[in-house]
Image: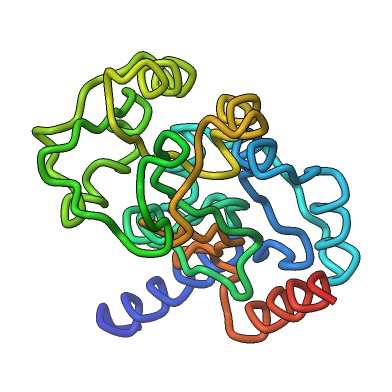
C-alpha cells in the first residue's frame, strides 16, 4: 500500500472517530432562560403564571434561572437561550433578538408640584429649572436618554425617589423624572394627596421583551414563530 493511500485511509479513520465523539445536539424542546425577577415585580407581573403560560402555549419546557452578570455572559454566548425582561439597549449589548409583542412597557414621566405648570399636555421649557435625579437613574442610563430634553448640569442628586419627592415638595428642586410603574410606591402617597402630578406626554417609553440569543443553537425562524405565537395568545 502506498504511503499516500495509507495517509488518506488514516485521515478518514480519525475523522470518523472524531464524528463519533461529538455529542448529540441538545433537544430544542427544552430551553434555558434568564428571568429578571426584580423587573417583573416592579412591573406588577407574577413570574409564575407568566412563565407557566409561555411554556404551556408554546409547548416548550422552559428552565428559568435568575438574571445576573454571569447570566448576561451566558446569554450573549448562547449558553442561555432566552431572557425574560430585556429592553432594546440590552439586546444590542448582548446580541439578543427581541420577540414581539412586548411583555410590558413603562413610561418615564416628568413630575412636578401640583399646579406648577399651566399645561401638563406638552413639554415645558426646562432650561433654568432645577431637576432631580438619583444614582440608580445614572447607572441604568436614564440620564443619558433624556439629554435632548433637559440640561444635565441643572440636575441635583438625590438619594432615592423618596428623597426626590421630599425635595420637590419643599422647593429644593422643580421637577424630577420617574417611571410610573417602577417608582410608583415612592410617589403614591403624594399623588393621592394631590400634591404632585405628572406630564401626560412621556419623556420615554421603554418596552421589555422575551428575547432569544442570536448565538443559541436552537434559534431558527420556526422556534421564533412558535414563541411569538405564544406571546400573542397571552395578550388575548
Q: Position of residue 170 (x, y in %)?
A: 37, 15
| Camera-nearest residue between 172 and 141 | 172
| 93, above or below 226, in the image | above
| 105, above or below 142, in the image | below
Relative placement, left or right, of 15 versus 167 is right
User: Is residue 21 visible from the viewing direction of this image?
Assistant: no
Please name the residue shown 31% across and 31% down the image: 139
Relative placement, left or right, of 11 versus 4 is right
Please identify the quadrant where the N terminus is shown: bottom left
Tell me the quarter of the picture where residue 140 sits.
top left
User: Is residue 111 visible from the viewing direction of this image?
Assistant: yes
Relative placement, left or right, of 236 versus 104 is right
| 117, above or below 178, in the image | below
Q: Position of residue 204 (x, y in %)?
A: 39, 58
Please name the residue shown 53% across and 72% down the image: 16
Q: Position of residue 23 (x, y in %)?
A: 63, 59
Q: Position of residue 181 (x, y in %)?
A: 60, 43
| Camera-nearest residue between 162 and 230 | 162
Q: How is the image coloured?
A: rainbow
Tell me the quarter of the picture where residue 46 sits.
top right
Please identify the quadrant where the C terminus is shown: bottom right
Relative placement, left or right, of 221 versus 51 is left
Please name the residue shown 36% across and 17% down the image: 167
Amino acid at each position: 500500500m502506498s504511503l499516500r493511500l495509507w495517509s488518506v485511509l488514516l485521515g478518514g479513520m480519525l475523522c470518523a472517530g472524531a464524528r463519533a465523539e461529538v455529542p448529540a445536539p441538545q433537544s430544542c424542546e427544552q430551553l434555558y432562560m434568564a428571568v429578571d425577577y426584580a423587573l417583573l415585580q416592579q412591573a406588577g407581573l407574577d413570574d409564575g403564571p407568566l412563565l407557566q403560560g409561555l411554556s404551556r402555549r408554546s409547548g416548550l419546557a422552559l428552565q428559568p434561572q435568575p438574571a445576573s452578570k454571569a447570566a448576561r455572559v451566558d446569554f450573549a454566548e448562547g449558553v442561555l437561550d432566552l431572557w425574560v425582561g430585556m429592553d432594546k439597549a440590552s439586546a444590542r449589548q448582548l446580541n439578543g433578538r427581541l420577540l414581539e409583542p412586548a411583555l410590558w412597557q413603562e413610561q418615564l414621566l416628568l413630575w412636578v408640584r401640583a399646579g406648577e405648570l399651566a399645561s401638563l399636555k406638552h413639554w415645558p421649557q426646562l432650561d433654568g429649572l432645577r431637576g432631580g435625579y438619583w444614582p440608580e437613574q445614572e447607572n441604568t442610563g436614564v440620564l443619558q436618554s433624556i439629554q435632548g430634553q433637559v440640561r444635565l448640569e441643572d440636575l441635583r442628586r438625590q438619594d432615592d425617589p423618596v428623597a426626590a419627592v421630599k425635595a420637590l415638595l419643599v422647593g429644593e428642586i422643580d421637577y424630577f423624572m420617574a417611571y410610573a410603574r417602577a417608582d410608583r410606591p415612592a410617589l403614591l402617597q403624594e399623588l393621592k394627596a394631590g400634591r404632585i402630578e405628572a406630564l401626560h406626554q412621556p419623556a420615554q417609553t421603554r418596552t421589555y421583551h422575551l428575547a432569544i440569543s442570536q448565538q443559541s443553537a436552537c434559534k431558527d425562524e420556526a422556534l421564533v414563530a412558535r414563541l411569538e405565537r405564544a406571546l400573542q395568545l397571552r395578550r388575548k
